[in-house]
Structures are given as C-alpha cells and as structure tokens.
Amino acid sequence: MALLVVAPATAHAGRTFYGWLYGTEVMPERGAEIQTWVSDESDLKDEGHADETSWLVQPAIGITDQLELVLPVDFVWTKVPGAMPPARTALDSYGAEIRYRMVSQDPVDAPPLAPLVRLAVKRLVTERETLQPEGDVVVSYQQDRFHGLVDLGFVGDISQDTQHFEIHPGGGVSIETVPQLRFGAEVFAEIMLDDHAGSDWVVVGPNMAWSHGRSWLSASFGIGVYNIKDAGRLQWGIAF
Amino acid sequence: MGHRVLAIVLALAGVARAERVTGKLTITDADGKPVSADAIVYVVGPIEAADPKDVPKITQKDRRFVPDLVAVTAGGSVAFPNADSFLHNVFSQSPERKFDLGSFRKGESKDKDFPKPGVVDVYCNIHPEMAATILVLPNRLHTHVKPDGTFEIDRVPPGHWTVVAYTRRAQRPVSAPIQVGAGQDATVNLALVRGAEAEHLNKYGEKYHDAGNTYR
C-alpha cells in the first residue's frame, strides 16, 4: 500500500508535513486556523466495512504559544458489504482535543527534537453511548531541509457494554526540495488490541507538503502492505 | 590563577583607557531639508557580550511602536509590552531573526532574544501602520542621538574602528572610520538622508487587506 503526504513548510497551527501523521507545530497564542482532511480507505479486509471516506473539519485555536485547542467534527461515508443499504453517510463524531508542544516554536530557541502530546475526547454520534478517547505522542526531528517524525497514536471506543482499543503507529521523513515544497515517505498502521485483530492494516507510500502564505496542504498516498488495498489522506488548512 | 589575575588587570586597564567618541548627526529628507528623527550611532569593531539587565522596550501604544528604533547587543532581549486596549501581533520576517509573538492584549508583554547581529524589522500583523527596527549589534557601544543631533559613546577602547549612524527609512546607513587613541577622544560628524516608509507584507507574506496610505 502506498501513502501520499502533502505538508506545509514553515510553521503554523498543527500543520504537518505528513498525510496520516500529526505534526508538532501549534498555533501561536490567540492564532486561529481551520484545518481539514479527507481520508480514503479502499478494500479494507474488515468485517465491518470495505471502503470508507472521511471528511474531518477542525478549527484550531492557540491558547498559548505551545498549547492548542482543536474542535474536530468528522463526517464519514462507509460501504458495508451485505448491509442494506450497502452504504451510508453520517455525522460520525465531534469532540475536543488539546495539543501541547513541549518545546518552544521559536526558530532560534527550538531544539531539533520537538515532542508534542495530543489528547482528544470525541462523541460518536451514531453510537450514542460511546465515547472515543484518543491520544498521540509525536516526536519530530528537524535538521536543515530534513524532517523526520514518529507518531504513536491511540484510539479507544468505550461504552458501558463494550471497550475497543487500537494503536496507530506511524513514521515518516520529509525533505524540502524547493522553498515551501517537500517530498518524502511515510508508513502508517492501525492495529487492533482486541478480537478485531483481523481488521489491522498497514500502508506505506510517498508524501508531499506545500505551504503558501496562510495556507498549507499535505497529502499521502499509502499503498497497502497488509489487509488493505490503499489509503490516502489529503490535509489542508488556512490560518486567520 | 596567575592568568586570571593578569586577565583582570588587563581588563581593568582596558576600561581605564577606554575613551569617548562624540560627534553630530544631521538628518535631511531627499530635498535636503533637515528632519527630526530618532537615530542610533554605534561603533563596529569591538566585540562584547550583552548585559542581561539591559532589556530595551518597544511598547505598542496608540497603534505605534514606541520607540520605533532600538539597539540591543547580540545575545540580549527586547521586551514588547502592549499598552493599547486591543490586541497586537508582533512579528518579524527578517532573515536575521524570524519570530511571531502571537496576539496579546493590554498589560501583557513578551520578550524575544536576538542572538545574532543584524537589522530586524518588526511589524504588527493586525495594524499595518506599525513598524519598528531593532539593531542587533556586536557590542554595547551604541547610543541614541540627542534631539540636537549630538551623540556621545563612552568607554570606546583605543583602536581603529568604524562609526555607523542608522535611522529608520534611511536610504542607507552612513559610516566613517575613526582612530581612538589612548587618552584621546575621537570626533566624527555624519549625515543621513531619510526617505519614505517601505511597504511591508503581513506575516503570511501577503498584502494587508485594508492597507491604504497608512504607512508612516
């Protein structure tokens, strides 16, 4: 499976150089940005569904120069084999998250290694009693035009009756080829920690990122190497 | 131990021998008419560390940076207090020191360090008419020019140096070589020509949406 990532160059609001991976940048204090992504998962070997397209919209607000508040809303189209109707579109979830960058963002003061912690809680709209806690520990390394990043994510579905947990590990590299334009590669996986293990999937592929003024975008086209045909994600954002 | 004593003695001797550079700066517009403007004169050559207690302020007041020209020794910091009742967003896109302080309100202040010498232009991302310049210098041998155009820079060590005068909106800084001898003051007179404020872009590299003829 291949993964394509498009990402921005210099720094603003949670922007990332990767498609499936969170970045380590946050908005400056009182800054605001609208971020969004479209994800496509095709021919997933999952009992629950085969294809899924997700559109997530999330305003981000800089609380301090290192702490960001994000309010994500997720719309999902899913095709379920054998179901009637076979496909559905729904407002899937909404919630709140914080992203805390643990070091300065100042280009002079920032060390090459930058960790970020992300914590989120979402309500699943179609499963009224289920809460979805999420978390990520992200560490990036920047040296001149080279950027590397490791993202260890966690997602849970918790209700009174059931609990389901996944980890979302990933990593990638991104190199600035010309100012504001970057190319690289990344790997991303979703691994179930319970009896849904058959739904695990892994993709690897190229990514790219571009920023222009207050706008940025990043994209990744992941080629499936396990349990999925392909999975791509396009992210973009605009700061105010 | 002996080297330390020797170093201290030499340092004290150097301070004792340091002399003064004086002079007068004339600022005119493009037509040659004298104009009043803040200006800084500094000496290039000696290298000194910044004094951590010396943190100049650039206050945001009445949609202006006050003062709009400060000097700081490399390694030092500048404070940016907001005295207006509304938000400002101080930033710089100068290659010597890019930064973005975010938006902050009345009573709040943020500091920024300036590790390398250079000229740093500072703006507000909300109010295009706000502009200031920070001269990051390699030593503490700098001073603001007095209203009558005269200046004095104390404790200049003996040697062959360059004196530079800078004001915002000048077409270019002016400089002159000086020879400071032991026990002798040096005098130099300089002249600057001041032009118009150059248009600048916001922190995203775009024109301000409501920018008219608001540049000072």
Image (cartoon, rainbow, N blue to C red):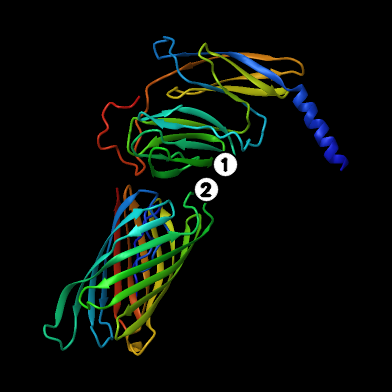
- Chain under numbered label 1: B
* Secondary-structure class at tag 2: loop
A209 vs A57, left or right, is right
Specify the farthest residue to the left. A85
The N terminus of chain B sits in image quarter: top right
Mark 1 and mark 2 in contact? Answer it, CB < 8 Å. yes
Q: Is residue B90 left or right of residue A214?
A: right
Quadrant of the image containing the C terminus of chain B:
top left
Q: Which numbered tag is attached to residue A108?
A: 2
Report helix, strand or loop for mark 1. loop
Residue at the outermost right position: B2
Q: Is residue A199 visible?
A: yes
Q: Quadrant of residue B203?
A: top left
Residue denoted by label 1: B115
How far is the residue under mark 1 from the one under mark 2?
8 Å
Residue occupying the point 20% across, 78% down: A78
Q: Residue at x 83, y 40 (%)?
A: B4
